[in-house]
Image (tube, rainbow, N blue to C red):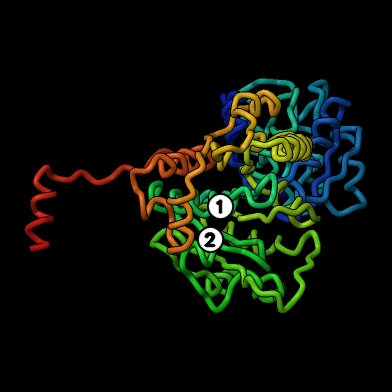
Amino acid sequence: MITYSRREQDQDEGPAAAAEEHIAPAPRVSVQAFCETVETAASVQSAGEDRRLDKAHLKIQMGGMTAAIEAYRTAPTPNVILLETDGRSDILSDLDQLASVCDAGTRVIVVGRLNDVTLYRELVRRGISDYLIAPVAPLDIVRSVCGLFSVPEAKAVGRIIAVVGAKGGVGASTVAHNVAWATARDLALDSVVADLDLAFGTAGLDYNQDPPQGIADAVFSPDRIDTAFVDRLLSKCTDHLSLLAAPATLDRVYDFGAEAFDSIFDTLRSTMPCIILDVPHQWSGWTKRALIGADDILIVASPDLANLRNTKNMIDTLKAARPNDRPPLYCLNQAGVPKRPEISAGEFAKAIESQPIVTIPFEPQIFGAAANNGQMIAEIAANHRTTEMFLQIAQRLTGRGEAKKPRTSFLAPLLEKLRAK
């Protein structure tokens, strides 16, 4: 007898809700699909190229339920079977035959054409994991397969936000660190900043931290990575913000394979609700993989021609690699430098075909003071306009509103003065 997990799918989600939806990636599992139509096979193929099924091994065959029953008479079943039925045959009878040749623990997703509550209840009673109504989109397949491995009682899988500069020197790290500060302080969301620029990272300086260990200890010891090990490497900045610092030393060369950071990111996902990646401005296998694998991407650019070209190239490349995700977002930084010819925000947006989240003005005094003091902009100028901009970015990337502050009495200021005396 097959044992399946049970999960109901919300059929009322609109396209906008799907675009904002956070779907946790699937683990390393095997998935075999038996399709009846070319359209469903194409959707499954597109789903297999989604970043959230990157670790899954997907195989597609035609023939539907009949082909599946025949295939598993002599072969072991995978972790997940996706079956399409044309509705002409008896679904329940076919499923009973399939159950007789399936291994215990196999999970089954059925794609059918009958929108019938009675049928759905009978499928659930038989232990089917999910029932999708054709035609199905690639995101429906991704949501269904990934949902099989999301335990409701478990902690929500953390959201990864990658911040990268369109060009060197545009202040992407400063933006990343201040956005992380706003996420932790104003949105009260437990967060960690991972400084991926191991040679020249500035997160330790910006947060005035000098931890003895950091991300280098993890990336150079992949066999030791687990929750406890990564927790020891984190440096506490505030109650809600931690730092995985870069060594910022040149005693070794930091050449990595494309999958070097995978286990670190997976471990952080399991313990932290929000992970902000400070990605250096370079194009290598691991930086591209980190950006494609993130839940949301923020590109930081200055208003000049080189930044415009690079921003457009990055957005186009990442949109093509992430067809089922929200497009990368971008912001303009260091706008309004005296005597410097600049591309206006409107012209920039026209070329990119989307508006920047915010346009951060060139404020050398306040940003310079914060950098030299190891502080965030909100610490030295809580009411400054850029502080509000960083909060806007944090809200947009996390999908959260500002955390409600506890009510205080109108006598609170007077009481504070009396306590001080």
Vertical side of 96 occupied by 253: above or below? below
What secondary structure is found at the residue carrying circle 1?
A: loop
Q: Nearer the viewer, residue 129 or 212?
A: 212
Mark number displayed over residue 192: none
Q: Position of residue 142 (x, y in %)?
A: 71, 39
Amino acid on which disc 1 is placed: Gly
Residue 296 visible in the snapshot: no
* Mark 1 / mark 2, whichever is N-terminal: 1
Q: Residues within 10 Å of mark 2 (few under 14, many from 20)?
A: some
Query: What's the CA distance linking mark 1 and mark 2?
Result: 7 Å
187 with respect to 217 (left or right): left
Q: Position of residue 384 (x, y in %)?
A: 37, 43
210 with respect to 113 (left or right): left
268 with respect to 383 (left or right): right
292 with respect to 88 (left or right): left
Quarter-of-image position of residue 321: top right
- CB atoms of marks 1 and 2 within 8 Å: yes
Reading the image, the residue beneath label 1 is: 158
Residue 395 visible in the snapshot: yes
Q: Position of residue 190 (x, y in %)?
A: 45, 56
Residue at the (59%, 57%) spot, across then down: 269
Q: Which quadrant, please, contains the C terminus?
A: bottom left
Residue at the (90%, 38%) spot, across then down: 61
Residue at the (57%, 49%) spot, across then down: 159
Amino acid on which disc 2 is placed: Thr
Vertical side of 227 occupied by 145: above or below? above
Mark number displayed over residue 271: 2
Vertical side of 76 occupied by 338: above or below? above
How many numbered circles does the render carry? 2
